[in-house]
């Protein structure tokens, strides 16, 4: 926990190099840590969502990679939705690089794996976000978009909402994509 606090302090440094190394360490810690809830207790995911919207070169991809690692844990996925993190992630798509879009697609796909998240994600118009991401000719991004859309389509009584958000057109696009 103290190590995470220290990394968070370094992420707020005025020096770009320090922030970048701290973000790399944070990404690595999020991928290997057994106590992912500690990240939320310190407000790290919310901070990473802010970093995504700041568009600081290289830092946004590392922040998204941290969120990607945290989005796999079913015990904390509701915090992605309750704290507005998913909304911040979706907002960052329009100006994202291909690498950042790949991380965002993985975050969405990971969250869509959790049944309790699916209806909320559909309500937050995540299908439109998947549509924006599915225009990228990048294999991993397209695979994550397809995985997320398939998971969301399995939600009972959600097909109409998915249709309204352009889900079937996206499905057609993905079916013709070269993953």
Image (spheres, rainbow, N blue to C red):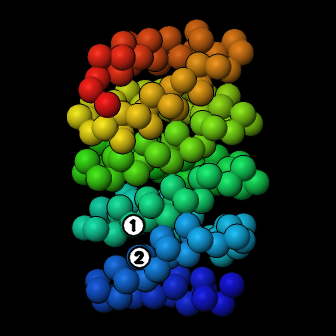
Residue 135: where, in percent of width, then height? 27, 30
Labelled pair 1, 2 in contact (Cβ < 8 Å) = yes
Residue 129 falls left or right of residue 116 = left
Sequence-wise, the earlier of marks 1 and 2 is: 2
Residue position for label 1: 62
Q: Which mark is residue 24?
A: 2
- Of residues 79 and 138, the one nearer the viewer is 138
Quadrant (top left, top right, bottom left, bottom right) of the C terminus:
top left
Is residue 21 something one can see in this rendering?
Answer: yes
- Of residues 117 and 53, the one nearer the viewer is 117
Residue at image position (46%, 17%) is 167
SS under mark 1: helix
Q: Is residue 130 above or below residue 25?
A: above
Mark 1 packing: few (<14 Cα in 10 Å), some, or many (20+)? many
Residue 68: where, in percent of width, then height? 51, 55
Residue 164: where, in percent of width, then height? 49, 12
Quadrant (top left, top right, bottom left, bottom right) of the N terminus:
bottom right
Residue at image position (36%, 41%) is 140
Residue at image position (37%, 58%) is 53
């Amino acid at each position: 926990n103290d190590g995470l606090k220290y990394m968070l302090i370094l992420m707020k440094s005025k020096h770009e190099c320090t922030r970048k190394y701290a973000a790399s360490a944070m990404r690595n810690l999020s991928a290997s840590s057994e106590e992912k809830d500690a990240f939320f207790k310190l407000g790290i995911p919310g901070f990473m969502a802010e970093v995504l919207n700041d568009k600081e070169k290289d830092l946004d991809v590392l922040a998204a990679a941290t969120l990607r690692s945290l989005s796999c844990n079913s015990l904390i996925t509701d915090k992605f939705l309750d704290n507005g993190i998913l909304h911040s992630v979706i907002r960052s798509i329009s100006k994202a690089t291909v690498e950042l879009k790949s991380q965002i697609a993985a975050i969405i796909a990971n969250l869509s794996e959790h049944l309790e998240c699916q209806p909320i994600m559909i309500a937050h118009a995540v299908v439109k976000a998947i549509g924006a991401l599915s225009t990228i000719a990048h294999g991993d991004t397209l695979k994550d978009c397809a995985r997320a859309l398939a998971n969301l389509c399995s939600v009972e009584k959600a097909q109409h909402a998915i249709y309204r958000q352009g889900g079937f057109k996206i499905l057609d696009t993905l079916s013709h994509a070269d993953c």
